[in-house]
Amino acid sequence: MSNQAPSAAQAGAALKMLESMKSKLGGVLQQIGGAKRKLKKRRKSRRKSRKKSHKKRGSKKRRKSRRKRKTKRRRRR
């Protein structure tokens, strides 16, 4: 390693390289952020669909009678 100061041209080139690296890093960070958001949304929608599938268990007739009983009980109170 030489201990003399770099020439103006070298300094300029180094600065340019740093700037380009910085912009590239910014892009990568943005991509990561977007991916995280997508993952969150996917998780949320999966949770929703799982809830829905659990909701519709059993036959329609049984569901209907269960609902009727529930409302009757509620009205009685």
Image (cartoon, rainbow, N blue to C red):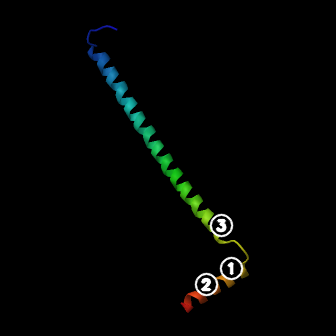
Quadrant (top left/top right/bottom left/bottom right) for the N terminus: top left
N-term mark: 3 or 2: 3
x%, y% of residue 43?
55, 55
Q: Assess disc 2: are there few (<14), some (14-19) or many (≥20) residues with their C-alpha within 10 Å of its C-alpha.
A: few
x%, y% of residue 73?
59, 88
Mark whose residue sits in front, 3 or 2? 2
Q: Residue 63 carries which label?
A: 1
Location of residue 54 with respect to 43 vertically, above or below: below
Q: In this view, does 48 lie to the left or right of 6?
A: right
- Residue at horizontal 69 percent and vertical 71 percent from the top: 57
Mark-to-mark CA distance, 3 and 2: 21 Å
Please tell me which residue lies in front, 61 or 29.
61
N-term mark: 1 or 2: 1
Q: Assess disc 3: are there few (<14), some (14-19) or many (≥20) residues with their C-alpha within 10 Å of its C-alpha.
A: few
The disc labelled 3 sits on which kind of residue?
Ser
Mark-to-mark CA distance, 1 and 2: 10 Å
The disc labelled 2 sits on which kind of residue?
Lys
Q: Do the residues labelled 1 and 3 touch (CB within 8 Å)?
A: no
Q: Would you name the residue on which mark 3 appears? A: 53
Q: Residue 6 carries which label?
A: none
Please tell me which residue lies in front, 66 or 33.
66
The disc labelled 1 sits on which kind of residue?
Arg
Q: In this view, does 31 lie to the left or right of 12?
A: right
- Residue at horizontal 32 percent and vertical 16 percent from the top: 10
Please tell me which residue lies in front, 70 or 3.
70
- Residue at horizontal 68 percent and vertical 84 percent from the top: 65
- Residue at horizontal 43 percent and vertical 40 percent from the top: 29
Q: Would you name the residue on which mark 2 appears? A: 70
x%, y% of residue 3?
28, 9
Q: Give the secondary structure at mark 1.
A: helix
